[in-house]
Image: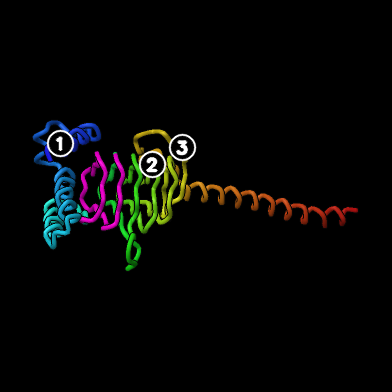
Amino acid sequence: MFRAIKEQIDTIFRRDPAARSVAEILLCYPGFHAILLHRLAHKLHRARVPLLPRVISQCSRFFTGIEIHPGARIGKRFFIDHGMGVVIGETTEIGDDVLLYQGVTLGGTGHEKGKRHPTLGNHVVVGTGAKVLGNIRLGDHVKVGAGSVVIRSVPDHCTVVGIPGRIVRRRDEEDALEHGKLPDPEKRQIEHLARRVADLERQVRALIGERTEEPASRKGG
């Protein structure tokens, strides 16, 4: 347990430039509290202890605003930044060095049985308010833009944005997810349509001009 606490503290110092001291992390970081409580609840869940794991999970939710089902499997150096509104479902699997921002949902799509929540690889970053839904897999080094809804699996080293999520960048080796620099596929489509409409308008004006000039030339002849 002490090793897990030290690992989480080191992870927060590495991930969050706002972290000032160990005391601040111990007292003021809900993501830190939620992860440690989940580690305990998950061990009890795997030992088939009845009810108590869910009680711990609900207490954690009440005090931190973060809901993690005791059945979720979470790897090393996991970090939830701020964390309010984060929901992680029962059959979710999360790799090492994963970062979630506030409002993220790793959820299901219905009442199906068995594996119904997503699997995240290593070094995945999921932006604020994003939803990753269903039994899908996000590969290693995948980045999900803020507010995106991902319902299909994503290969390694891709960046996904939009509703539904679309791959807009591949083989991106940067560690940080810069929300202000993400491509906007909807904007590009609208700009393409606007250029196409302008081209069609020019063609129509040219055709109208040719038709008006033709009768005048015949009359003069």
Picture coordinates of residue 67, whole percent (x, y): 20, 55
| Chain part drawn in magenta | 70-96
Q: Residue 83 magenta-drawn?
A: yes
Find residue 140 and name its label: 2
Which quadrant holds the N terminus? top left
Residue at position x 35%, y 63% from top? 109
Q: Which residue is mark 3?
A: 171
Q: Which residue is mark 1?
A: 3
Residue at position x 15%, y 36% from top? 3
Residue furthest right in the image: 221
Picture coordinates of residue 44, whole percent (x, y): 15, 54
Q: CA distance from mark 2 to mark 3?
A: 11 Å
Q: Is 186 placed left or right of 177 in the picture?
A: right
- Secondary element at tag 1: helix
Picture coordinates of residue 162, whole percent (x, y): 42, 51
Picture coordinates of residue 95, whole percent (x, y): 31, 44
Task: Tell me where residue 152 sits by quadrant.
Answer: bottom left
Q: Residue 106 magenta-drawn?
A: no
